[in-house]
Every structure is written in C-alpha cells, then in structure tokens.
Amino acid sequence: MTDSERETERRLERAILDLLDRRGPTATICPSDAARAAYAGDDDGWRLLMEPVRRVTGQLVEAGEVEVTQGGHPVDPATARGPIRIRRL
C-alpha cells in the first residue's frame, strides 16, 4: 500500500467516526456520506472512494468500533452486497 493510499484510509476512518460521533448513539451513516466527507473535490470523484470506504469499514468492524447493517440487521461487511449502513457499537 502506498503512502497516499494509507492517508486516504486514515481520512476515511476519521470521516466515518466523526460522522457517527455527530449523530445519536443508534444512528447510522451511508458509506457515501463518508466518501463525500473525505473527498476534497466538488465533482463526483467521491465515488472512487466507495470501495476504500467499505475496506476501512471492514477494518473498523474487526476493531470492534462499528457494525454494518442491511435492513436494520447486522451483516458481515465482507459478504454484504448492495446498500449497507454503518453504526457505532
């Protein structure tokens, strides 16, 4: 992993945790919220961050910081397909 990729992952992790900290304890965020918050541009370039957001989310799940849900139920981020939500544990 390059230094740039590591920095992107750190920005995404901060974005995920900051967004969750600003919401209620049971609130969720969409991965796109974190991608948009971490992206510095004003175009659709945030979409390129969606896969890295999922990867970072998986790392946060492993660390016991967050969980991933679909339809309000916890799911494994490694196998989840389609829209997911992220919430604090």
Image (cartoon, grey):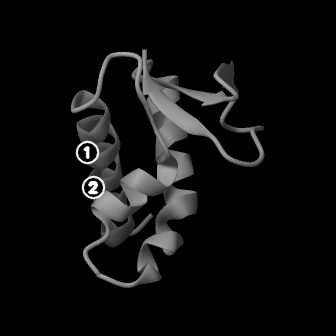
On the picture, is 43 further left or further right than 86?
left
Amino acid at pointer 2: Arg
The secondary structure type at the circle numbered 2 is helix
Locate residue 84, reporting x and y percent. 63, 40
Percent across and percent down for residue 75 are: 70, 25
- Horizontal placement of 23 versus 36: left or right? left
Task: Give the vertical position of 73 relative to 76 (above or below).
Answer: above
Picture quadrant where residue 11 is located: bottom left
Give neighbour class at mark 2: few <14, some 14-19, many 20+ (Cα, 10 Å).
Answer: some
- Per the model, the C-alpha gap separating discs 2 and 1 is 5 Å
User: Which residue is pictured at 40% across the width and 53% down the height?
Assistant: 33
Is residue 41 shown above or below 81?
Answer: below
| Mark 2 touches mark 1? (CB < 8 Å) | yes
Residue drawn at (54%, 61%) of the image:
50
Which residue is found at the position 56% from the left and 49% from the top? Answer: 54
Compared to 42, does 70 lie above or below?
above
Q: Which residue is the site of mark 2?
A: 11
Local packing at callout 1 (Cα closer than 10 Å; few below 14, some 14-19, many 20+) is some
- Front-lying residue, 84 or 78: 84
